[in-house]
Each structure stands twice: as structure tokens, then as C-alpha cells.
Amino acid sequence: MNNLPPEHAPLVQFSVQDDCLQIGGIALTRLAQRVGSTPFYAYDRQKISERIALLRQHLPNEIRLHYAMKANPMPAVVHHLAGQVDGMDVASAGEMRIALDTILSPDKISFAGPGKKEHELSSAIAAGVVLNMESEQEMELIAQLGGYLGIVPNVSIRVNPDFELKSSGMKMGGGPKPFGVDAERVPDMLIRLGRLGLNFLGFHIFSGSQNLDATAIQEMHTKTFQLGIRLAEHAPSPVRLFNIGGGFGVPYFPGDRALNVAAIGDNLQHLMPQVKRQLPDARIVIELGRYMVAEAGIYVCRVLERKISRGKIFLVTDGGLHHHLAASGNFGQVIRKNYPIIIGNKVQGAEREVVSVVGPLCTPLDLLADQMQMSKASIGDLVVILQSGAYGLTASPTAFLSHPIPVEVLV
């Protein structure tokens, strides 16, 4: 009877030479020497570029690609992407400052998220960034601040649709939500917007994230366009910007399979003629974060100790949930599942074993891998968590127990 744990789908984005993972054309062991210490994050610029090229290949030419910076705001990653995407979405003044330092013009940067502070709104208005308004109250405040500054703010309405993205890892629309304005309230908001004299650009409709079901995304796109066209009838001016969100997922866990982007592109190609007829002035945007960068990144930590407890082997490392909360299962997982993890300098290995990988924190939550089969590791070997380019370091409690913050490198 085979009692081995289930395996992940083959992840072949990185090559292997002499049983050592290569990233950015560099052997992992050499990269670790170059960085100088573990743990660290490494992102492969070529893999990011290849992902953008894949999207361009399959999506209609009319679609504009925006990067959702919350996925990975490392400045070097953002600057690399700025030369390849058509715009960016930010969720704080800090992210906005990074985006404004790139080659993108301010009107190609949008600012979304509830609870924007007055100083954030004022900075965005002064910069010429597009504000995705999350409520009627925020709209009134934006108009007031624009009057103080003597600037007409660029605005779009973030809509909470009356549907959700099925099979989504995180549902961002449908039902009561803190995000956006309920679709049924948008027509009245548009009337008020016209009286306030704001520079209305369009709509932002984001229904969910981390979805691997192409059929569900196709259905979401169809419903999103229908809703946007319906709402446009109430707009004070033609819709010039229509952000239909993202939701494209990547495989993390056993049983996951890569998203069929070609099928999504075919459906969009079918929908675009009607959209262009009814919204002829609209720039159609797909906003992606995770899908652009997740598979291009790795997290690397080092084995400090092999520990046996009541017949089970634990690899104790210098990394942990304080650096990679998602891999520990404490960032949105209901039932904990293992990220794909390998011994980076012994990818296949002469011997295999089932082990758990834990970090140095004094909590049972500090679990990076639970009873996974991998190469037999020795003290000093490098543990690699794949699929780590998105929602890694900045989504983790780095201050917990006051350990050093890991280095990030783009190679």
C-alpha cells in the first residue's frame, strides 16, 4: 500500500543542472554565495517577461495589461514590469510612490482600496493618478480635496457586482463586501458624480482572485461586460476606462493544474466586438498581480538541524512563517496544504525521504512543509519554496520574534 503524500504537478519553469536549481541563469548555490546569507527571495526577470509574453500571445490586442503591485512591490520587480505592461494598480501611498518612479505616466496608474486617507487622496489627485472610488463618501471627499487643490481629480468607480467569481480562492465581489459600491447604487452615484464635476473615466469591477477554472473566468468576463455596459447608460460622459479585474490563478497545491489562458483569450476575442460597439471609447484593462510574478519567484532558507521526534524527521531551517506566511498555511487557507518545496541543491537527490520543514519560531504554526517527500537533506542544504514571487515577504509578519528581514534579489 502506498502511503506517500500526494505530489504536486510538475513545475518546470526553472532548469536544473547537476541536480542544482538554476534561477536567472545562476546555480542556486552560487546565488546564495552572492546574496551572502539566507533566507532570501529571488525573482527571475526572464520568467516574468515570459509570462507577459504569454498573456500578449493569447489575449486580444485591445486588452491592456495592468500589474497589481500588491502582489510584489519590490521596486526592482516593479521597474522591470513597468517597461512591459500598460499600467499599474496600487493600494497605498507607498505603492503609489514606487509606481510614480517608473516610466509609466500617472494616468496609467490607478489607486484602489477602501479607507484611503486624506493625504493619500490629495497626493493621488496632485499626481494625476486615477482614483478608484470605493464609496459615495469617498467621492465627496475627493471632490472637496480637488477643490482645495484646484485640480479636477481623475476618478473611476469600483463596483461591487451582483455576482461572484465561482471557484475563486478569495471572493472580492458579490454579496456584502467592504470593496467597491454595490452595483444597484452606482446609477445614483453617477448622477451625483456628474454634478461634482469630477473627471469620470469608467469602472473597475473585480470579482475574485486565484482562480484556476477557465470556464468560471469566462463566465465572469461575460457578466462583467454586461454589467459595465448597463451602468454606462447612467454615466455623465462616455466610459474611457473599463478595468475588468483579474483572478487568474497559479497552481500551488497537489491536484492544481495550470490555468488555460488560451481558452480565456478565445472567449474575450468573441466578446470584444460587442464591447467595442457599445463602449467605443473604453480602454479595456485586465489587472493581474499573482499571475504575472508568482511562478517567477522562490524563497530560500538553509537547513540548520535534522531532528527526529517519535519517528518523524524535522528539518529545522533559518526561515519560517515570519518571512513566508502563505507557505505556512496561515494566509487564506482553510485546510492547510503544502506549497511545492524542494531541496534546491539536491533537486532529485540520491535518496528520498518524507520530512516536515519547520522554522526557528516558538510556535507550532511555523510549519513550511508537513510530511512531504523530498531529497534527503543535510545540514547546510538549501530548502526552496517555489511559487513564491507573489504575496511572500510583504504579506508576512516580519516583525514577529525580531528575526532579520530576508534580502530580495531580481536576477
Image: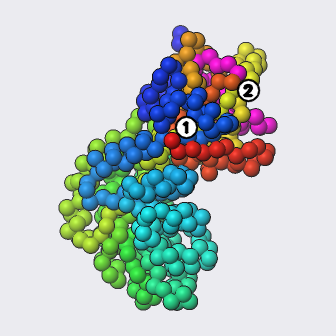
Q: Is residue 229 left or right of residue 157?
A: left
Residue 299 in view, yes or no:
yes
Assess whether residue 96 is covered by the magenta stretch.
no
Residue 178 in view, yes or no:
no
Percent of width and height locating residue 373:
58, 20
Percent of width and height locating residue 328:
64, 38
Give the answer, above or below, for where 307 lies relative to 186.
Answer: above
Give the answer, above or below, for where 193 lies relative to 81.
Answer: below
Q: Residue 304 carries which label?
A: 2
Assess whether residue 375 is covered by the magenta stretch.
yes
Q: In this view, does 353 lie to the left or right of 99?
A: right
Q: What residue type is labelled 1?
A: Ile
Q: Is residue 277 left or right of residue 32?
A: left
The structure residue drawn at horizontal position 67% and vertical position 43%, both measured from the top left corner, is 406
> Quick one: SS at disc 2?
strand
Mark 2 nearby-residue class (10 Å; few <14, some 14–19, many ≥20): some
Percent of width and height locating residue 81:
44, 53
The structure residue drawn at horizontal position 39% and vertical position 79%, both measured from the top left corner, is 200
- Colouring used for the render: rainbow
The structure residue drawn at horizontal position 53% and vertical position 13%, both measured from the top left corner, is 2
The structure residue drawn at horizontal position 74% and vertical position 44%, both measured from the top left corner, is 404
Give the answer, above or below, for where 276 lies relative to 310.
Answer: below
Q: What span is colored magenta in the figure? A: 356-379
> What residue is pinned by disc 1?
298
